[in-house]
C-alpha cells in the first residue's frame, strides 16, 4: 500500500474512534481568548519554572509532538506564532489517553495556565483540550516547508501552513495595497469600481479573454485595463479617481507576467505626465516608508533609494546611453540589420517607432536598476496619449523602471475626440487585418470625449510587481496567492 494512503487510513481510524467516544472532531467553534504571539510578548519576563494563575485559552495547528510517558509536549501554531503545550497524565487523567488520537496537522484548542519550563520555554500547562479539526491527510516535509515550486503554487494552503515566511509576504501585500489606498485618499482621489465584464475591451495593447452572456446572446470580454471607464468618470465631473482591480490578458507567462494580475490606475484632471512622475515618486516613497518603516529597500543585494528623485530619460536617449547606438540617425535598412544582428523578435506591422520600442525592450531594461522614468515613447506605441509638445514623432508617455522591470505606465492623456476617433479607426483596421492586440473602436468612449473631457494625467502601477520589489520576491507567482497554473499532468 502507498505509505501516504496507509497514514490516511490510520487517521481515518482515529477519527472513527473519536466519534465512538462521543467526541465531535469538527466542532462549530472554540472560544479562543489569547494568541501565541501576544502570550510570548506578555510573559517574556517570566523566569524559568515560574508560574502564573492566569487561565489561558489558545488554539492552533499541531506542529510538533513528543511523548515521554506520563507527560507530552506539543507546539501549536496560530496566526501570530507558536507556543508549547504541556500535557500531564496527573492533570488530564483519562483525557490524557486521547493524545494518541491526535496527529501533526490537527487543529486543537487548549485551556490551562502559563508557566516557563526549567529549560526556559514559555508553555501552557493544559487542563482541558479539545479537538477542533482532525487532519486526515498528513502534512508535507515534516513541516520543513515545500521545496517543489510547482507544489508551492498549486497547494498554497500547504505552503502557508509550513512556511511562515510565505505568510509574511501576503501580509505585506495586504499592507502595501492599504498603503497605496491611503496615499491616494490623502491626495483627494476617489476610489471607484469599474466593470470587469466589458462589451468592448480597451486601454492597452493585449489579447483579451472572451466570454459570453447567454441570457443576452452577447459576447463579452474580461477587462484588460480600467482606463476607458476611469476616463469616463473624469468626463462626468470627477477630478481625481482611482481603482485597484484585476486585469486579464491572454498573453505569455513568465516571472513578471501572470494572465490575471492586479493594477492600480488613477486619473487626475488638469495634470500631465510630469505631474504623474512626481505622484509616482511620492507614492513609492510613501508606501515603502509605511510598510517597511524606511525609504530604502535591498533587492538581490542592491539598495534602491526611494527618497531621491528618479532619473528621467527619453527612450531614444536610454538606447544611446546603454548601447551607444543613436537610433535617431538610423535609416530603414539600419533598423532591419540591427534587428537581425541582435536577434530581436518583432511582431505586427513594421514602423520605425515599433522598431525603436522593440530595440529598447530587448537591450535596455535589464540595465535600469535604480528607479528611472523612461519617457517620450514613439507615437506608434499607443493610441491613447497626447503627442509630445514640439515633437510629432513622440508622445508624452513614461514607464517607471527599477531592477530591470517595468513597474507601470503613464500618459498625458489624449482628450481630442477627433484625433481619438481617427486613431481608433486606424487600430480597428489593423484588427481586421489580423492584429490581435490592436485597440478596438469604442464609440461610447469617443462619445463621452465629444461631450467634453478635461486634460488629465493617467498612471497605472502593477501592484504585483510593487509587492515583488518590496518583499524581495523573485517571481510574480510568489506574490499571488493562487497564480494561474497549467493543468497537472496525470
Image: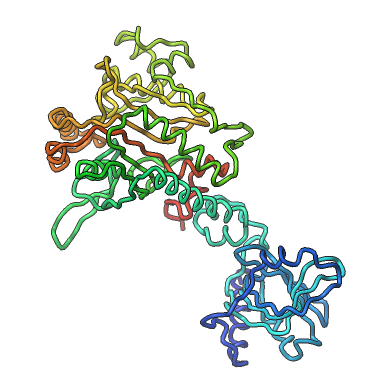
Q: Nearer the viewer, residue 6 or 462?
A: 462
Instruction: Answer with left or right where residue 486 lies relative to residue 50.
Output: left
Estimate the x, y position of residue 237 in percent, counting from the top left: 21, 44
Estimate the x, y position of residue 318 in percent, counting from the top left: 44, 18
Q: Nearer the viewer, residue 450 or 78?
A: 450
Badge count:
0
Q: Nearer the viewer, residue 316 or 445?
A: 445
In the picture shown, does residue 213 fall above or below 190? Answer: below
Instruction: Answer with left or right where residue 16 lies relative to residue 313.
Output: right
Q: Quadrant of residue 335?
A: top left
Instruction: Answer with left or right where residue 144 lies relative to residue 114.
Output: left
In the picture shown, does residue 319 fall above or below 122? Answer: above
Estimate the x, y position of residue 186 in percent, counting from the top left: 42, 45
Q: How is the image coloured?
A: rainbow
Q: Residue at x 58, y 71 (%)?
A: 137
Q: Quadrant of residue 352?
A: top left
Residue 433 seen by the camera: no
Estimate the x, y position of residue 432 in percent, counting from the top left: 15, 34
Quadrant of the rendering where the N terminus is positioned = bottom right
Amino acid at each position: 500500500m502507498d505509505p501516504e494512503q496507509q497514514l490516511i487510513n490510520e487517521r481515518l481510524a482515529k477519527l472513527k474512534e473519536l466519534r465512538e467516544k462521543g467526541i465531535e472532531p469538527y466542532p462549530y467553534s472554540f472560544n479562543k481568548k489569547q494568541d501565541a504571539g501576544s502570550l510570548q510578548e506578555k510573559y517574556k519576563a517570566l523566569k524559568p519554572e515560574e508560574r502564573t494563575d492566569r487561565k489561558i485559552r489558545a488554539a492552533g495547528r499541531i506542529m510538533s509532538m513528543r511523548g515521554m510517558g506520563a507527560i507530552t509536549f506539543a507546539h501549536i501554531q496560530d496566526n501570530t506564532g507558536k507556543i508549547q503545550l504541556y500535557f500531564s497524565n496527573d492533570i488530564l487523567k483519562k483525557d490524557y489517553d486521547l493524545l494518541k488520537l491526535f496527529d501533526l496537522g490537527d487543529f486543537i484548542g487548549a485551556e490551562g495556565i502559563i508557566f516557563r519550563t526549567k529549560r526556559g520555554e514559555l508553555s501552557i500547562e493544559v487542563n482541558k483540550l479539545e479537538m477542533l479539526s482532525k487532519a486526515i491527510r498528513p502534512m508535507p516535509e515534516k513541516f520543513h516547508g515545500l521545496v517543489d515550486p510547482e507544489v508551492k503554487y498549486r497547494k498554497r494552503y500547504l505552503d502557508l501552513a509550513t512556511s511562515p515566511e510565505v505568510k509574511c509576504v501576503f501580509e505585506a501585500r495586504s499592507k502595501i495595497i492599504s498603503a497605496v489606498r491611503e496615499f491616494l485618499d490623502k491626495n483627494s482621489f476617489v476610489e471607484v469600481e469599474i466593470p470587469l465584464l466589458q462589451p468592448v475591451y480597451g486601454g492597452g495593447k493585449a489579447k483579451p479573454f472572451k466570454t459570453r452572456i447567454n441570457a443576452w446572446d452577447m459576447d463579452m470580454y474580461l477587462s484588460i485595463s480600467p482606463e476607458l471607464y476611469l476616463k469616463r468618470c473624469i468626463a462626468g465631473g470627477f477630478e481625481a479617481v482611482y481603482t485597484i482591480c484585476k486585469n486579464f490578458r491572454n498573453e505569455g507567462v513568465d516571472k513578471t507576467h501572470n494572465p490575471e494580475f492586479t493594477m492600480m490606475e488613477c486619473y487626475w484632471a488638469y495634470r500631465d505626465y510630469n505631474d504623474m512622475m512626481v505622484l509616482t515618486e511620492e507614492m513609492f516613497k510613501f508606501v515603502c516608508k509605511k510598510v517597511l518603516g524606511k525609504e530604502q529597500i535591498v533587492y538581490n543585494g542592491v539598495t534602491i533609494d526611494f527618497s531621491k528623485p528618479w532619473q528621467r530619460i527619453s527612450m531614444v536617449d536610454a538606447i544611446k546611453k546603454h548601447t551607444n547606438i543613436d537610433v535617431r540617425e538610423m535609416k530603414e535598412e539600419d533598423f532591419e540589420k540591427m534587428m537581425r544582428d541582435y536577434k530581436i523578435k518583432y511582431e505586427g506591422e513594421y514602423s520605425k517607432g515599433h522598431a525603436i520600442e522593440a530595440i529598447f525592450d530587448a537591450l535596455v531594461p535589464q540595465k535600469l536598476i535604480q528607479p528611472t522614468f523612461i519617457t517620450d515613447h514613439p507615437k506608434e506605441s499607443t493610441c491613447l496619449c497626447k503627442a509630445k509638445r514640439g515633437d510629432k514623432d513622440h508622445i508624452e508617455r513614461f514607464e517607471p523602471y527599477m531592477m530591470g522591470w517595468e513597474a507601470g505606465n503613464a500618459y498625458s492623456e489624449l482628450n481630442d475626440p477627433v484625433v481619438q476617433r481617427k486613431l481608433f479607426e486606424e487600430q480597428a483596421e489593423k484588427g481586421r487585418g489580423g492584429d490581435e492586440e490592436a485597440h478596438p473602436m469604442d464609440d461610447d468612449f469617443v462619445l463621452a470625449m465629444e461631450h467634453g473631457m478635461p486634460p488629465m494625467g493617467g498612471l497605472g502601477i502593477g501592484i504585483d510587481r510593487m509587492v515583488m520589489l518590496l518583499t524581495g520576491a523573485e517571481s510574480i507567482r510568489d506574490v499571488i496567492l493562487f497564480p494561474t497554473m497549467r493543468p497537472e499532468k496525470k
